[in-house]
Amino acid sequence: MKLTKILLSLLFAFVVCSAFSAKKKEPKAVYAFGVGASFTDTVVCYTEIQMLDSVKLDKGGFLPQRDLYSYQLKNYLEGTKGLPNRTCMIYFSKHKDRLEKELVKVLDRYKKNKSINLKKLDATEFRFKKPQE
């Protein structure tokens, strides 16, 4: 009986200690790329897949302030590249490999039209920045 109490006490202490020492899961990285196209121009610009700094998806799995990331690309294309009237879209995921497949799909849609010129924006040229909260 005494041995059973000691074993149960040790087991209880082990369970309590392990519950407090469990590591918290670090948030997975969020990756994104952007595409800027115009209905009146044949140039379509797209970014490389980039890891977004200090970003967590919300409970619904959406990127918070995703419209601001699109505006960053739009402002860059209009201001720096001189490409006005762009419609910019951002694609995001926690899984880089899935996002790479999505990028290929998007580019293939544009490549079907032979008159469209695709321009890649390197990460040295343009990087998404976390919007101010």
Image (cartoon, rainbow, N blue to C red):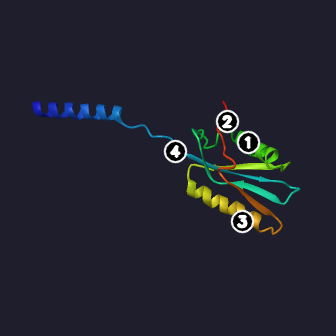
**Vertical comparison of 87 with 13: above or below:** below
* Residue 48: assigned label: none
Q: Earlier in the sequence, mark 1 or mark 2?
A: 1
* Residue 72: assigned label: 1
Q: Amino acid at mark 2?
A: Pro
Tell me if mark 3 has few (under 14), some (14-19) or many (20+) residues whose alpha carbon lies within 10 angstroms of its own. Answer: few
Mark 3 or 1: the one toward you: 1
Q: Is residue 130 left or right of residue 9?
A: right
Q: Earlier in the sequence, mark 3 or mark 1?
A: 1
Question: How far across and how far down the image is residue 33, in percent?
Answer: 66, 51
Instruction: State the residue at coordinates (42%, 37%).
Output: 24
Q: Amino acid at mark 3?
A: Asp
Residue 1 in view in this figure:
no
* Residue 131: assigned label: 2
Q: Which residue is mark 3?
A: 108
Q: Measure the alpha-carbon separation of dots 1 and 2.
A: 9 Å
Mark 2 or 3: the one toward you: 2
Q: Amino acid at mark 1?
A: Gln
Q: Which residue is mark 4?
A: 28
Q: Measure the alpha-carbon separation of dots 4 and 3.
A: 28 Å
Q: Is residue 94 left or right of residue 110?
A: left
Question: How far across and how far down the image is residue 62, in percent?
Answer: 64, 43
Instruction: State the residue at coordinates (66%, 46%).
Output: 127
**Vertical comparison of 37 with 22: above or below:** below
Tell me if mark 4 has few (under 14), some (14-19) or many (20+) residues whose alpha carbon lies within 10 angstroms of its own. Answer: few
Mark 4 or 1: the one toward you: 1
Q: Measure the alpha-carbon separation of dots 4 and 1.
A: 23 Å
Q: Is residue 5 left or right of residue 110?
A: left
Query: Residue most toward the right?
Result: 40
Q: Earlier in the sequence, mark 4 or mark 2?
A: 4
